[in-house]
Amino acid sequence: MKSSICKAIWVVAWLAIGCFGAQAQPYQAHIKTAQIWVTLDGQPEHEVPSLQTLPWKWDEHYPKQRGVARFSLQFRLEPHQYASAKLHSQGLGMSALNMGNRYRYQINQSGWQYVGWNEATTQYKVKPRWHSVPAELLMLGVNTIELELKMEPANDAGLSMVDIGDAAQSMTRFQSELEMRHNSMVLVSSFSFLLALLAIGMWFVTKEPLFLWAFLSDSFFAARQLSGFVDYPPIPTWLWNSGLGILFAMFVGFTFKIAELLVPKPSRVINKMIMVYLGLCAPVLLIGNALGDFRFYRAWLTLMTVLTMLLVARVTWFALRTKDFNLRLYTIAAWMAMVLGWYDLVFIQLSESGLGKMRLGSYTTILFNVGLAIIVIRTYIRAKQDLFESHVRSELEKTKATLTERQRIMADIHDTVGAQLVGVLDLIRTGAPREQLEAETTDALEDLRIAIDAIQPVNGSLTAVLATLRHRLEPRLEMHGIQLLWHVEALPRLVNLTPQVIQHIQRIVLEAVSNVMKHAKARTITFTAQSLYEGRTVAIQITDDGLGFDEATLTSAGQGLSTMRFRSEAIGATLAFSKALPCGTRLTLTLPIV
């Protein structure tokens, strides 16, 4: 009797101590080793010798192969720990940063629980996992968890260290880890998309290549981050992983282009290296994933890292030699990205111990994109300022050119119309007949009107210039009894048809017509203008039916012919004289269309 009472008292005390101990220090164990059995496709199961340390990465041990790995994990519950789990009826929680790719598990031979076991494209590996270990399945002493994983090559398959702990606390830690990853992906992708929209908007305004590369860079990176929200990709796993790798590789290549645009002396060799890199991204990663060979991806990461170090060193060299704020800011961001990217490569990508751990490069990219955003905004402001200054300079040059043109026209009017008016004044003083005075005054007035015509806007239309000239010439020719035959077709637009060019054409035509009226004794003048050689030139011809010309007259040309040749050369045209049939003279002025 006393023995029974003592035993009952001992059990109660044991439970009380267990409960107190559990409240004081919740149970937590880190399973760092496992016994592993592997079944490769088409082969019998075999045991991996000795206990294996977790994390355990499939590609490190069985590259390019598929199969199933069975893990036997053990943890021990002491009496007070077992009592605590039983008393609260909460059991324990099992969590791991990586259980990939598809798996099933059972606690103490209680029956299998399946997680994506029959799904062909699950991506559970990209998220931490948590499962409840019910209190009724626990045993005092050694407990065994059996975990079977379907393994795929080149897919980060494997098992990270497994944590066993108080259900409530382990769930809290798991949710905190999951929320941190989720929020970081949302933050990085959202910021990258916003920067991409900002960059493409600025590119449409300025057409600066920097903005286009920034848009591509952030678009690709944001798209890659969104993959973290996909548990069931719509395409085969190898193709999905290829796409993710290509997005990241292209993002890095675009940042290379941005760096090369920022340096003051871009290199053709570096640009070719970057373009070769961008061109090889897709085929190399596709081949590696199609073959299931993770070594392709490792080789590519190593190559990318070496190229990154080369370009960062190049940017740093220029940043130290110049005072360009954008270049220095980019250099700081690039160094941060490179150092943490190197950490990700060595300690996460290429190491078993990094299986399931979150890569620091994701956080680095936030800082990198902040720097890039500052550079984009500063470059846009500078481009707008340069555009404004260029516009101001252009307006000043136009104003200066207009003033110069006005002064030139005023000088020309002074030399022509002024001289004519002086001649009229002399005729008045000498008592010349009224008819002569009227004719000379009319000619001076017509020359003044023609000079004014030269400064009227014509928008490159030589047809309009010639039509105005015809309006001025016809009355003068009628006074001399000469008929004007007009054959002018629609002429192409001349970009360089400035007032100065117009005036030179006017003076050449007027001098030719004046010579006909004074010397040729012609009855008709035929004016022709047409485009030749598929619109590359315009030919203006003035043909009369008068007396013609003597070759000696042209070789010993007077002031009028010399001035005509000078004017034609000034506008890049050619001037030629030939005999017309059956009689008369033909002047041909050939203008290039610019």
Image (spheres, rainbow, N blue to C red):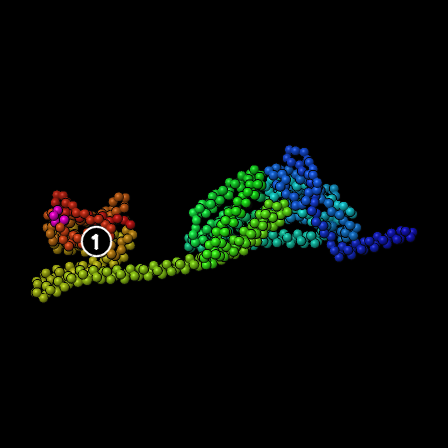
Q: How many marks?
A: 1
Residue 484 inside the magenta-drawn segment: no
Whether residue 164 sits left or right of residue 515 in the image: it is right
Where is residue 111 shown, x and y percent of the image?
A: 72, 42
User: Which residue type does callout 1 highlight?
Assistant: Arg
Seen from the viewer's position, the closer of residues 473 and 237 is 237
Residue holding disc 1: 567
Residue occupying the far right of the picture: 1
Seen from the viewer's position, the closer of residues 283 and 82 is 283
| Viewer can see residue 377 | no
Q: Secondary structure at mark 1?
A: helix
Seen from the viewer's position, the closer of residues 574 and 239 is 574
At x 11% / y 64%, what residue is drawn?
A: 426
At x 54% / y 43%, what residue is drawn?
A: 300
Whether residue 434 sits left or right of residue 16 in the image: it is left
At x 13% / y 50%, what residue is drawn?
A: 556
- Which span of residues is magenta-colored? 551-555
Q: Residues within 10 Å of mark 1 (few under 14, many from 20)?
A: many
At x 29% / y 60%, what residue is drawn?
A: 401
